[in-house]
Image: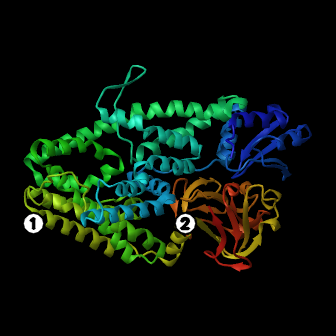
Amino acid sequence: MAVIDHRSLASDILESVGGQSNVDSVVHCATRLRFKLNDSAKADTDAVKALPGVLAVMKAGGQYQVVIGDDVSAVHAEITKLTGSGSTAERSAAVVDGPVWSPKRLLNGFIDVVSAIFQPIMWPLAGAGLLKALLSIALQLNWLDATSQTYVILAAAADSIFFFLPIFLGYTAANRFGANKFTSMAIAGALVYPSIVDLGASGESVRFFSIPVTMFNYTGSVIPIIVAVLIQSHLEKNLMRIVPKMLRNFATPMISIIVMVPLVLLTVGPVTSFLASALSTGITDVFEFAPWLAGGLMGGLWQVFVLFGLHWGFLPAMLNDIAVAGSSVQLAPLPSAVLAQAAATLAVFLRTRSSVRRGVAGPASVSGFIAGVTEPAIYGVNLPLKKPFFFGIVGGSVGGAIAASGGSAATVFVFPSLLGLSAFTTVGSFVLQIAGVAIAISIAFALTFAFVDRESTADAESVEAAVAVGTVEIVVPVDGTMVALADVPDRVFSSGVLGQGFGVVPSEGVVRAPISGTIITAMKTGHAYGIRSSDGVEVLVHIGIDTVRMNGEGFTPSVARDDVVKAGDIIAEFDIEAVHKAGFDPMTLVVVTNSKQLASIEPIGSGAVSHGTPAIAITV
């Protein structure tokens, strides 16, 4: 979908409605600019309709309404800048400005974003991880020779998605942040390009136009490309405003690539390398006087280090210790860290009611235990559920402290796994190493099994809808009678210009979320809410027709922008009688505003319904 140049569109709309002098006032609701014109005859409706970004124009209630859709608030903001009349308009119909920035909300938001970005590639990750586990077993049992061409081919098949992970995440992150997907993949591809990887491995100084570059290994990394695509999405929006239209198609991707690749190399690499080096040096020093404390830190935080790519900073020290001293104590806590996460995933596998969650958790736990591959376990199971990830950290910390207290060390560099424990048999106490691993597994498994919810039937169904075959289900948000969108008494909605959906004649004044996701729009008037699911489905819930004119009377919001909701959570309450008395229709509308970007949207409900009844099946 083309990116709207908000400033240009705002200027064109003002000119087409008769200029600034013809505008008495302008406000916006969830989808429309609502003008009060001094002389409606001066407005060139055909010209307004022809503008890119305008979905429809209608005249109702003494207002000249220009339907924009999701970008309405941005276009309205540009109009107020041009007219200098923003204060009144913003007070009357602006969105709720956002959350209280608590650490918990920031952490939850970060986890939700990372989990959503990983969700589309969970099955390939799980399958590749299981293949890596099987190859590890084949090597241990001498079924395959690590130097054979057969093994090389199979290992490449298993490792490719992990090695080139930034490219996959570039695509899914672009889908999440609204960036150009293939530009994002090009940026990610540059980060793992062989010559860039070789520059980092050579140890030589690297310069970009005389600027020193601290190289970092981006293969298998997660956070750098996610941050890069987030910045790219904002860069592209600005470029679309300033680059001439005749040049945009090729100039915008070119400039984005030119800017973003060096920017990541010049910023993410140095910051990550500095943090990783500082952490490695600090924990190495702690090993000297308090091995149990260093083991607890490494065992608890290793998977967090992996998440942020900081683990690369420890590898040189580990490899140097093995080469010089014959062993590395820094490796000792890692089996506890990795196997605790695998154990938490196994507990989810045994606990959940969702067959799809089990389908991810089963192979993920096997690949974690056997091969030390935790990406499918962490990103597909533990991190989205939050508690299993933290329980894994607790188990890893305790187990790592026990293993390190016995002086355990690895004589060769291995992936921390059950099969890799053989590397710890000759240095330090192998008994305490095994005890630490066993306790780490027990703690993570027991806490997860005891305290992680089994997931209600509705939650399990939502997981299956989202993960199994790329489908998402929209449910009815309010008790009442469903109405086909074509029969809704509002031309903009009924025409489908805003997207496909349905209406409900409500019998109660409690409105619930029709889909799980993040609140992206919450009108101060309390009558409209936008929700974006982790799959990228965007849904508008509009309570009543033209009820923005009630200025919030009779509406009680229960959520704010950036809140995370589950399908069925109450998002607002309203007084049906008050809506009737004000002369408006209380029909509640649900519209999938990005319908054109989805594979299919099929209605599956009708007639008298209660909240939670499946209404639409979407294939993403």
Assess whether mark 2 and mark 1 are in contact (beta carbons under 8 angstroms): no
In the depicted view, which residue is nearer to us: 436 or 17? 436
| Secondary structure under the numbered disc 2 in the rendered image | helix
Measured Cα–Cα span from mark 1 to mark 2: 44 Å
Task: Please state the horizontal and vertical placement of residue 578, each as a whole percent of the image.
Answer: 72, 66
Amino acid type of the residue that numbered disc 1 sits on in the rendered structure:
Val
Q: Which residue is mark 2?
A: 466
Q: Please, is residue 519 above or below residue 23 in the view?
A: below
Q: Residues within 10 Å of mark 1 (few under 14, many from 20)?
A: some
Amino acid type of the residue that numbered disc 2 sits on in the rendered structure:
Ala
Camera-nearest label, 1 or 2: 1
Q: Is residue 160 left or right of residue 553?
A: left
Q: Is residue 116 left or right of residue 572?
A: left
Q: Which residue is mark 1?
A: 431
Q: Residue at x 37, y 38 (%)?
A: 197
**Which residue occupies the extreme right position in the image?**
41
